[in-house]
Amino acid sequence: MRLMRRLWNRSTAIQSGEMVLEGGEPPPAHPQNLVRALRLRNALLVAGLCILGVLAICQALKMNDFTKRITGNEWSGWVGYREADSPNFNDRPEFTIVDCIVLHSTAQHSLGATVQVFEDPNSHVSAHFVVGKDGTVVQMVPLTKRAWHAGTSRLDGVDGVNDYSIGIEMSNLDNGRDPYPLSQYKAVAEIIRRCRKHYYIPDNRIVSHAEIALPPGRKDDPLGFNIPKLIKLADSKS
Ligand SMILES: [Zn+2]
């Protein structure tokens, strides 16, 4: 450290023209030494800037992690949004890129009943969002975490869809007759738009649980839901 400080002082003095011998004479010329000292100083400067950059990125990621709960400003003013905590989640595998949304129907009578199931640690199931028929949205798991909604599954040849997806459960009896009101479609479309502020999720990666469940046929939800209609709503600006 002391050596580095000496080199730093020396190169600074050389550059600013302050370095003279005691007798007032200019220093003897050692061009190679001077160049080496200047290079070292520049390298130290670059290394320092790199460290600052990394620290800034870490801080930004930390803040982003908080906002991915989609709390506070991001949802404020949106009537019908609330949070509940499900204990049924874990970490996504390291370096996972979230790039798809899996749609489900709850096969239950009410939003409250589904929230209760997801709050129960013994149920071992959850989703990032639950959406009521009136468009009420309850977020139960942060987007950065791995919710337990898809089970054994595969999308485009990649197993374990829970690892890299966002799960949205819609209140519906899943019998093919129970309707999905427009308010519910609009709420899900709004969730997709907001998730897309954080992740790149192309239209063809918005899929039903039925499409990805293994073995094929294990799940049929969300039965009767029109995904192209949802995608059109999500892609529109309104
Ligand atoms: Zn499902």
Image: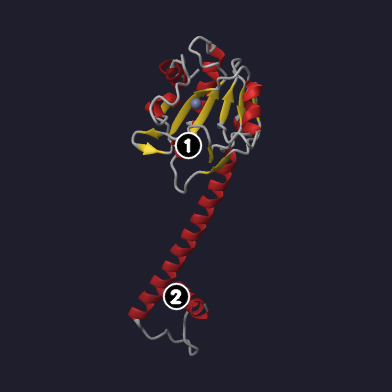
- Disc 1 marks which amino acid? Asn
Identified at 46% across, 14% down, the residue is 224
- Measured as percent of width and height from the top left, residue 109 is found at 61, 17
Query: Element under label 1?
Result: helix
Q: Is residue 214 above or below residue 56?
A: above
Residue 55 - label: none
Identified at 54% across, 11% down, the residue is 181
- Which circle's residue, 2 or 1, is located before the other in the chain? 2
Identified at 40% across, 29% down, the residue is 212
- Measured as percent of width and height from the top left, residue 229 is found at 43, 15
**Label 1 crowding class (10 Å Cα cut-off): few <14, some 14-19, many 20+?**
many
- Residue located beneath label 1 in the image: 162
- Measured as percent of width and height from the top left, residue 68 is found at 56, 38
Q: Nearer the viewer, residue 101 or 119?
A: 119
- Measured as percent of width and height from the top left, residue 150 is found at 48, 32
- Residue located beneath label 2 in the image: 11
Can residue 208 be seen here? no
